[in-house]
């Protein structure tokens, strides 16, 4: 029987090198798909959330054993990716919520120029934030493209 000394190690190294070389292009594709999903979601909801996809962060490729990996994060995406149900935010003696009252002439006589309260029923008018699934759907689409 003939053996090829070092063949398996060389083949493994060549495969990992190729994977590492392709990673930036693949990462760009996934980021592009997610951005498209974010844009469609923002358009449907009337949101101005460009910062979500513009603040994407990627790490450099990392090799460990027989894998090559890279981390992609959208730091401010959680609330939009998974949604937020309407809820009450409670203040305490150190936390209250202040915002301008309606303009002069539209508020009742004697009403304060600022409204201050200890709780806010967040999302009661808007119904909260619906989930976008921008990242999860991007991963599904990307995996499908890789399988072709």
Image: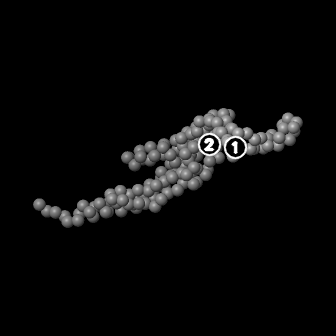
In this orientation, does residue 126 appear? no
Instruction: Answer few, some or many: residues within 10 Å of disc 2's Cα (few below 14, many 20 plus, some between 14 and 19).
Output: few
Q: Is residue 48 above or below residue 61?
A: above
Q: Quadrant of residue 12?
A: bottom left
Q: Residue at x 54, y 41 (%)?
A: 82
State the residue in front, 47 or 32: 47
Q: Is residue 19 above or below residue 132?
A: below
Which residue does the numbered mark 2 point to in the structure image?
43
Taking 59 as reference, is 39 left or right? right
Taking 4 as reference, is 42 left or right? right
Q: Residue at x 77, y 41 (%)?
A: 115
Q: Residue at x 75, y 41 (%)?
A: 116
Q: Quadrant of residue 43?
A: top right
| Residue furthest to the bottom | 5
Q: Quadrant of residue 89?
A: top right
Q: Which mark is residue 32?
A: none
| Residue furthest to the left | 1
Instruction: Answer few, some or many: residues within 10 Å of disc 1's Cα (few below 14, many 20 plus, some between 14 and 19).
Output: few
Which residue does the numbered mark 1 point to in the structure image?
93
Q: Residue at x 16, y 63 (%)?
A: 3
x then y, percent, for residue 120: 68, 38
């Amino acid at each position: 029987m003939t053996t090829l000394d070092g063949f398996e190690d060389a083949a493994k190294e060549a495969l990992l090198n190729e994977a590492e070389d392709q990673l930036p292009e693949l990462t760009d594709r996934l980021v592009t798909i997610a951005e498209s999903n974010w844009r469609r979601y923002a358009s449907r909801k009337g949101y101005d959330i460009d910062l979500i996809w513009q603040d994407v962060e990627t790490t450099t490729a990392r090799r460990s054993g027989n894998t090559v990996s890279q981390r992609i994060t959208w730091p401010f995406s959680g609330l939009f990716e998974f949604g937020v149900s309407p809820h009450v935010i409670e203040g305490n003696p150190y936390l209250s919520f202040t915002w301008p009252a309606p303009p002069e002439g539209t508020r009742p006589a004697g009403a304060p120029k600022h409204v201050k309260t200890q709780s806010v029923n967040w999302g009661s008018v808007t119904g909260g934030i619906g989930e976008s699934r921008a990242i999860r759907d991007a991963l599904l689409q990307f995996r499908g493209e890789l399988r072709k």
